[in-house]
Image: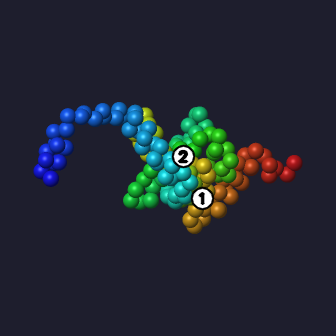
Amino acid sequence: MTDEILHTLFDETERRPLTVTELNSEVKGVLERGFSGVWVEGEVTGFVAAVSGHWYFTLNDGTSQIRAVCWKGTNFRIRFKPQNGIAVRVRGKVTLYPARGECQLVVESLEPSGEGALRAAFEQIKATLDAEGLFLPS
């Protein structure tokens, strides 16, 4: 047994370390296979509607947080625009943003949750339609 321990300590075979890019690629694959259709509830913080049309925000539950992104091609189907402080329910997949090695949630659907959520969504839709002049008598 002592020989086995000594052998592992002085093994002449050198292992090639992964590059950061290789490691991040492996982690991304594991995350995407394991968390491809998760539902998450939390409060929106740090909401940014980028010029590109993408939405970036953080979901927070008071103890933990995760960054989230909703691509322009997805957010046009969402019937309300998230705001800081609103509770939401999100369906999406967990992935890794390799350039920074950060875990994030890619949003596939998003809806208000909690008390008053439907009212908030209704008020947003109503304000949008009013701005388009759809409630004018003419």
Q: At x 57% / y 67%, what residue is drawn?
A: 115
Say few, some or many: other residues with alpha carbon within 10 Å of mark 2 (under 14 / 14 to 19 / 20 or more): many
Out of 2 and 69, give the one closest to the viewer.
2
- Residue 136 seen anywhere in this rendered image of the structure: yes
Q: How is the image coloured?
A: rainbow
Q: At x 60% / y 58%, what residue is drawn?
A: 112
Most extreme residue toward the right, as rendered? Answer: 138
Corner quadrant of residue 71: top right
Residue type at mark 2?
A: Val
- Residue 100 seen anywhere in this rendered image of the structure: no
Q: At x 50% / y 47%, what residue is drawn?
A: 32
Give the side of residue 108 with respect to residue 17, left or right: right
* Residue 36 locus on image (x, y percent): 54, 51
Say few, some or many: other residues with alpha carbon within 10 Å of mark 1 (under 14 / 14 to 19 / 20 or more): many
* Residue 108 locus on image (x, y percent): 60, 49
Front tag of 1 and 2: 2
Cα distance between the residues tagged 1 and 2: 17 Å
Residue type at mark 1?
A: Pro
| Mark 1, secondary structure of its residue | strand
* Vertical comparison of 65 with 101: above or below: below
Give the side of residue 83 with respect to residue 20, left or right: right
Out of 65 and 103, give the one closest to the viewer.
103
* Vertical comparison of 1 with 102: above or below: below
Q: Name the residue under label 1.
A: 112
Q: Mark 2 points at which residue?
A: 106
Most extreme residue toward the bottom, as rendered? Answer: 115
* Residue 93 locus on image (x, y percent): 53, 49
Mark number, residue 30 = none
Q: At x 51% / y 49%, what residue is drawn?
A: 33
* Residue 39 locus on image (x, y percent): 55, 58
